[in-house]
Amino acid sequence: MATLVAPPPTLRERLAAHFRTCTTTGLPICPSAVFFIKLNAVAAVVFLLVGAIAAILLALTRWSAVHLLDPVWYYRLLTLHGINMLIFWILFFEAAILYFAGTSLLNTRLFSRKLAWAAFGMMIGGALMVDYVILTGQGDVLMTSYPPLKADPLFYLGITLVAVGMLTVIYNFFGCIYIARRDKTYEGVMPLVAFGAMTAAIIGVITLLHGAIVMLPTLSWALGWTAMPDPGWYRLIWWGLGHQSQQVNMAAMVAVWYFLGTLTVGARPLNETVCRAAFLLYILFINLASAHHLLVDPGLSATWKIWNTSYAMYLAVLASMIHGFTIPASLEVAQRLKGYRKGLFGWLAKAPWRDPGFSSLALSMIIFGFMGGITGVTIGTEQINIIAHNTLRVPGHFHTTVVGGTTLAFMGLTYYVVPLLFQREFYWRGLARIQPYVFAVGIVMLSIGMSFAGSYGVPRRHWDVEFSGSLIPAGFDAVAHFMLGVLGVGGSIAFVGMLMFIVLVVAAVFFGRSNKETGMVPWQTPERMRRNQEVFTMPYNEEYRKATHRTPGTLVLVFVLLASFAVYFFANWKALADVWFVR
C-alpha cells in the first residue's frame, strides 16, 4: 500500500513557523535579530546623548560671548564629542540597520546569535573603555590622536575592540546574505535597500581594516613595546578610517532614504539598475575622498593630491548626484500618481510633512545636498582647500553631512523602527512631529555659523579665539564673533531638538503602549496609507511608465542645486585669487 508523503513546506510556511509578520508592513521579523536590533539601537541612543551633552558645552565655549569651559575640559570634551558622535552613535545604529536588512528584507534568519553577542560585547566594552579614558584625563588627544600625542593604551585598545566588533557584525550580515542566497528566500535580485546596506558593509570592511592597521602599532607604542609610528604614515592610514567611516554612514543613509520613501509615500526607485550602479561607484571610488584631509601635508605629491580629490573622486560624486535625482524623483512620481499634479511643486506641497519619517527624510536630503555636498566638493579641491584647511569651515561642512544628513535620517527611521520592531507607540506625537524641524533649524544655524566664521579665518579647534593674554595683539573682527554667536544659538537649538528625540525614544521604548495586537498607529491618515500602498503595489503599466518620465519638479530642484554649486565654487576661486593678489 502506497504511503502519502507530505509536500515540503513552502517558504512562506517556513517563515511563519520561525518569524512573526509585521501587521503594518507585512515584513517577516526574526525574533533573534529584533533582540540585537533593540540592543544596538538603545546603546546608540545612549552614546548619542553623551555626544550631545559634550556638543552643547563645546558650542557654548566657541560662542565667544559665553566661553564656558576652561582649555583642559574644552579639549577633553572635543575628543569625547567626536568619538561618541562620529563613531559610537553611528556604528551602533548601523549595526541595528544591518541586522534588520540582513533578516527582514531578505526573508531569512540571523546567521549567528553567538557572533552577535560577541560583536556587541566587544563594541560596548571598547566604547566604555574609550570614554572612561577620556573622562579621566588619560586621552586628551582629540579624535585623530596624531602622534606624538599619546593616550593611555586602553584608548587604542578600546577603539580596536569597537572596530573588530563592527567587523563581526558585518560578517554576521554577510552570513545572512549567504543563507538567503542558499535558501532562495527572496525572488529576483536583492532588494535595493538591502543592497545599499551591503554597500555600507563592504565599505565598512575596508574602513575598519584601516582602523585596525593604524591602531595596533599605536597601541604597541603606547605600551612601550615599539617605537612611535611614523606620523606621516599614521595620518595617511588613519584617514582611511576617519573619513571613509563617514562614507559608510553615507551609504547607509542613502539606503535609509530609499526605505523611508517607501514607508512614507509608497515610492519605488525609478530604475534599480542605475541605483545599484551608483552604489557600486561608492564602493570603487569613495575612499579617494579621504585624501582631502591631507592636502596641506608636505609628504605627499601634488599629483597624488589632485588625482585623489578631482578626476577619480568625481566618480563617487556622480554616485551621489544619481541618488540625489532618483530619490526625490521617486517621491514626485508617487505623489503625482496619487493625483497631486498641480504645478511644479504641488506634489511637494501635498507631501506628508506632519509625518516625522518624511520630514526627516526631506530635511536630511536638503541639508546634505545643498549644504554638505556643495561645501564638501568645494573645500575638498586641492587649490581651494588652502583657504579652508583647519578652519571652522571644515566642521561646518561635516555637521551638514554626518549630523544634518545621516543623524537626521536615522532619527526619521527610528520613528518607524520603534513601533514596528519594538512594538511600542510614541507618547507626545505632536512633539514628535515638530522634532525634526527643531533639530534641522539648529543644525543649519550651527553649520552656517561655523562656515562663515571659518571664512574669516577662525581656527577649527582653538579654545580662545580672542587670544587672551597674548603678548602680540591678535583676534578676529566683529563679524567673526557674530557668526560664533550664530553657532552658539544654533547649537543650543539643535541640542533641544536632540533632547526631544532622546526623551521621545526612551519614553516609547520603555514605557510606550504596546501595539502587538493592533499594529502600528500610522503617522498619516488611513486614507493616505491606503493610497501609499496602492501606488507601491501598482503594476508597471503604461500609466506608471509615463509617470516615471514626468518629474519636472525634481529637474528644477536639481538645476537649482547645480546653479548653487557653481556660484559657491567660483566664489571660492575668487576668494583664493584675493589671497594671492597679482598686480
Image (cartoon, helix red, strand yellow):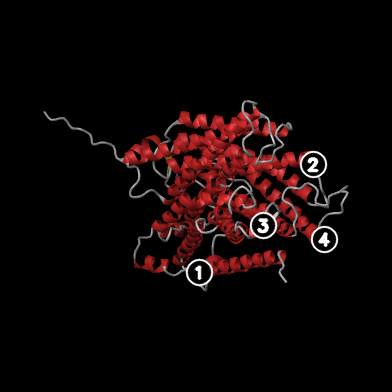
Horizontal placement of 578 versus 420: left or right?
Answer: right
- Say above or below: 326 vs 10: below
Horizontal placement of 69 versus 296: left or right?
Answer: right
Check disc 1 and report the residue beneath it. Answer: 555
- Amino acid on which the number 4 mark rests in the picture: Ala
The C terminus lies in quadrant: bottom right
The mark found on residue 71 in the picture is 2
Horizontal placement of 190 versus 119: left or right?
Answer: left
Mark 3 residue element? helix
The mark found on residue 478 in the picture is 4
Mark 2 residue element? helix
Given residues 525 and 349, the one toward you in this image is: 349
Q: Residues within 10 Å of mark 3 (few under 14, many from 20)?
A: some
Q: Earlier in the sequence, mark 2 or mark 4?
A: 2
Q: Earlier in the sequence, mark 1 or mark 4?
A: 4
Q: Residues within 10 Å of mark 2 (few under 14, many from 20)?
A: few
- Amino acid on which the number 3 mark rests in the picture: Ile
Q: Residues within 10 Å of mark 1 (few under 14, many from 20)?
A: some
Identify the image quadrant of residue 232. top right
Contact between marks 2 and 3 (CB within 8 A): the answer is no
Alpha carbon separation for disc pair 1 and 3? 34 Å
Q: Earlier in the sequence, mark 1 or mark 3?
A: 3
Identify the image quadrant of residue 351. bottom right
Percent position of residue 60, x then y: 77, 48
Check disc 3 and report the residue beneath it. Answer: 386
